[in-house]
Amino acid sequence: MVIAVLGATGQLGSELLELWGEAAVGLTREELDLSDPSTIEATLETIAPEVVVNAAAYNQVDKAESEPAAAMLVNAQGPRQLARWCASRGVRLVHVSTDFVFGSDTSRSEPYAESDETGPLGAYALSKLGGELYVRSGCPDHLVVRTCGLYGHAALRRAGGGNFVETMLRLESAGGPIRVVEDQRCTPTSASVLAAAIDALLESGCRGLYHATCGGSTTWCEFTREIFERSELDVEVEAITTSEFGAPAARPGYSVLDCGRLVRDTGYTPPDWDDALTEYLASREADHE
């Protein structure tokens, strides 16, 4: 089976390529650009995959507020073209989405199931929801996988790349207290965990909409403190509110995802977020040796 992986140099794409080995063909933006529909058909026709995994996205949440058309082009119109091509050739399409499709329910305190009503708050979130809807309506043989707070090793190897863990470790070297939001609760998820979940969904023949994150939940401030504690770094972390942080784009105050369907249908139980963080930091140290 040939699997085409879009976003090959990204955090998830690189994990999937490592996991699947020779079965996967990695595609960079230079080879298949979701903002340029002409590259989609031309590239995929050459590869003739049986499965297409879209791990590429416009993911600059704040910048999307000032350039919503660019976000919509990559996150919604691109997947729409992918869905059309896959549907016309009987190819399975796996599309990665986000917890940001939720957020408008400010009283929420229970994990979201796949069947819960969405409520995106900003331009990025709207574009990702648009991509979901195009894939789900346009390609019968689809998997849409929502995740949250992704971090992976590709950020270490890519110039200018980063994720939340690496950003916090970089800020530590600058000295002084680090101010981190305390009133957003979610589940940071390592790319290796998400890759394993997608692999389990494919192996089990699953179709439709699934949530796939690590287990449990935390706030970004709690997560930051764990990063430093497990890295044996003495860093002052100051808890602040979302309004104090003042980001251009609104974020969900609560976006924990219920992964019960993933566990039931595949038998794969993702590790809790703190265990996944420990494993990431340990493998990060091994990479540096």
Image: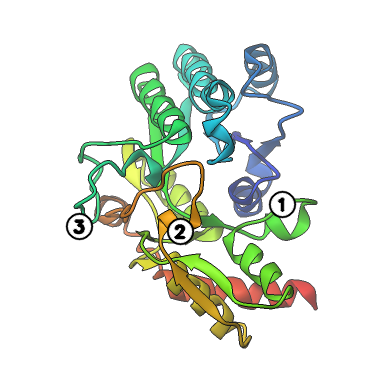
Residue 15 lies, with reference to residue 80, above or below; the image says below
Residue 146, located in which quarter of the rendered image?
A: top left
Q: Is residue 55 visible?
A: yes
**Quadrant assignment for the N terminus:** top right
Residue 55 lies, with reference to residue 90, above or below; the image says below
**Residue 202: % across, % down:** 43, 43
- Name the residue beneath numbered marker 3: 110
Q: Residue at x 29, y 57 (%)?
A: 263
Alpha-carbon span between mark 1 and mark 3: 33 Å
The mark nearer the N terminus, 2 or 1, is 1
Horizontal side, residue 237 vs residue 21: left or right:
left
**Residue 255: % across, % down:** 33, 52
Residue 229 lies, with reference to residue 72, above or below; the image says below
Mark 2 or 1: the one toward you: 2
The mark nearer the N terminus, 2 or 3, is 3
Q: Amino acid at mark 1?
A: Gly
Q: Is residue 52 visible?
A: no
The label shown at residue 216 is: none
The mark nearer the N terminus, 1 or 3, is 3
- Name the residue beneath numbered marker 1: 161
Q: Amino acid at mark 2?
A: Glu
Residue 250, located in which quarter of the rendered image?
A: top left
Q: Residue at x 31, y 44 (%)?
A: 103
Q: Amino acid at mark 3?
A: Glu
How many C-alpha atoms fall within 10 Å of the one at disc 1: few (<14), some, or many (≥20)?
some
Horizontal side, residue 174 vs residue 256: left or right:
right
Alpha-carbon span between mark 2 and mark 1: 26 Å
Proximity of marks 1 and 3: CB atoms separated by less than 8 Å: no
- Name the residue beneath numbered marker 2: 244
**Quadrant assignment for the C terminus:** bottom right
How many C-alpha atoms fall within 10 Å of the one at disc 3: few (<14), some, or many (≥20)?
few
